[in-house]
Image: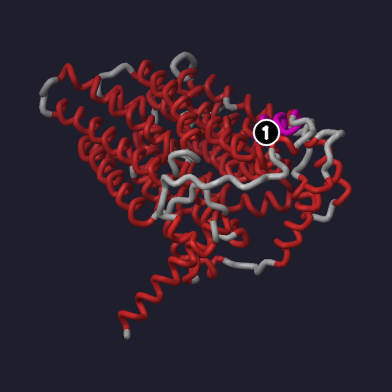
Amino acid sequence: MPIENASDELEKPFIQQPKSADPEGESGQNGSIFMVLLSTFVAICGSFEFGICVGYSSPTQSSIRHDLNLSLSEFSLFGSIITIGAMFGSITSGRIADYLGRKGSMRLAAVICIAGWVAVYFSKAAWSLDVGRFSTGYGIGLSSFVVPVFIGEIAPKHLRGGLATLNQLLIVCGSSFVYIVGTIVTWRTLALTGLIPSILVLVGLFFIPESPRWLLKVGRRKDFDLALRKLRGKDADISHEAADIQAGIAHLEDLPKVGVRDLFDAKYTRAIIIAVGLFVFQQFGGINGINFYSGEILAEAGFSREKGQIAYAIIQVPITLIGATLMDKSGRRPLLMVSATGMGFGSFLIGAAFYLKAHALLLEWVPMLAISGVLLYIATFSIGMGAVPWVIMGEIFPIYIKGIAGSLVCLVHWSVAWLISYTFNFLMTWNAIGTFWIYAGFSMLTVLFVAKVVPETKGKTLEEIQAALSAHRTAKNRNRNLLED
């Protein structure tokens, strides 16, 4: 497809694009992929840690509050402060990954998470809980950047997409794991389980190579050759791939350097609006409130906290797999709109359950409405709004501003995530019905935002996407000039 026609094609989400010939496709990789798989496994242990950290507050709220005599506001701060830590982690992640390398960054993230879990385990007061929670937040904020970057830099291109989806899948698995185990063990023992993936990362890093691209970027040519050879196998011909990587690094060095102010240039406006908008709507749909406190939601509605959390945990993994499968078949926009619609309906059902409870109507229906709403919400979130915004963010920014633009978007994401997670308990105290119907309203607005603003990027090269965004901007400026004339 010619790049000059990309603008028209960008709005056709259901049209399949022809596959181009790939001389280095599956048949072109004649080396062993064992080291790639091992390296990916070590990296996604950090993703599993991410899921455990995020899900920890849901099964532990009542027991921590009881054991340490915490007020609602104190526990709300504990639950939400992880997002503040993640905010700082994501802001500093790019520079740390460039300075320490991908392995060094993952090692640092693992050590910080271990320190955080130890602080939580030994906590006798709210302040030490918060310190530990903040530390785990910083660790996952750092790893949330470096893990997908590392996987993308070590994987052969015919495996890159599939291996990249494992990052989101393992986050969901970690969250599901802590929901289930949290129904069996105490909150202190559950904190110890958070040490396991970080320890696996620390041990595993001794057996895997550094990112070849980072090694070449910092001038370690000999180490670059050894790392690439180790990843592709001793019998693989790496000359062509090595030449491509060298050309890519040389091209990056020739690109213009940009700062935060440059992001507000008119040529980046639409991409910024799309990325920031998706994450703002994702969070204002209430995901962190429901994810962090699902156990208490179900208990308030009269449903078994333990059974509800187990069902919540079980449904996430297969639905996330389905979403990953559909992403390059149905397209990004349809998945986002179906996902947001389901989230809105799920939130409406939860609000309806609390409405019936408040008015003493059909009380036998209240628990089933609540669990149905929660499960529908998390299932539809997992199929689209969970992963697709991250994918689109990686597609719509030019390569030379991806780092700084990604940091800005992540800052907005974690800031809004903190706002939602911190205010959730207070909103529930104010009006449980209104809380979930507000979330439902934002989910419906998300559908409108996607339909009007977000382009379809399925089957397009990054160059075609950039050309289409540029053509859209040019057409908009031309129309504005015509109106002014």
Question: For this rendering, which residue is in front, 437 or 392?
Answer: 392
Instruction: Indicate whether 379 appears above or below 273.
Output: above
Badge count: 1
Quadrant housing residue 297 = top left
Instruction: Indicate whether 375 appears above or below 112.
Output: above
Residue 434, magenta (yes or no)? no
The range drawn in magenta is: 34-43
Provide residue 413's location: percent of width, then percent of height. 46, 49
Helix, strand or loop at mark 1: helix
The residue sitting at the top extreme is 184
Residue ID at (45%, 65%): 269
Provide residue 336's location: percent of width, then percent of height. 39, 43
Crowding at mark 1 (Cα within 10 Å: few <14, some 14-19, many 20+): many
Provide residue 263's location: percent of width, then percent of height. 52, 66
Q: Report the amino acid beneath label 1.
A: Thr
Instruction: Indicate whether 35 appears above or below 10.
Output: above
Residue 38, magenta (yes or no)? yes
Residue ID at (40%, 34%): 75
In the drawing, does residue 195 fall left or right of residue 227? left
Quadrant in the picture for the C terminus: bottom left
Residue ID at (60%, 56%): 403
Q: Main secondary structure of the magenta part?
A: helix
In the drawing, does residue 293 fall left or right of residue 317? left
Provide residue 381's location: percent of width, then percent of height. 39, 36
The residue sitting at the bottom extreme is 485
Quadrant housing residue 232 = top right
Give the image's coloring scheme.
secondary structure
- Report whether residue 84 is seen: no
Disc 1 target residue: 40
Quadrant housing residue 358 = top left
Residue ID at (54%, 56%): 1
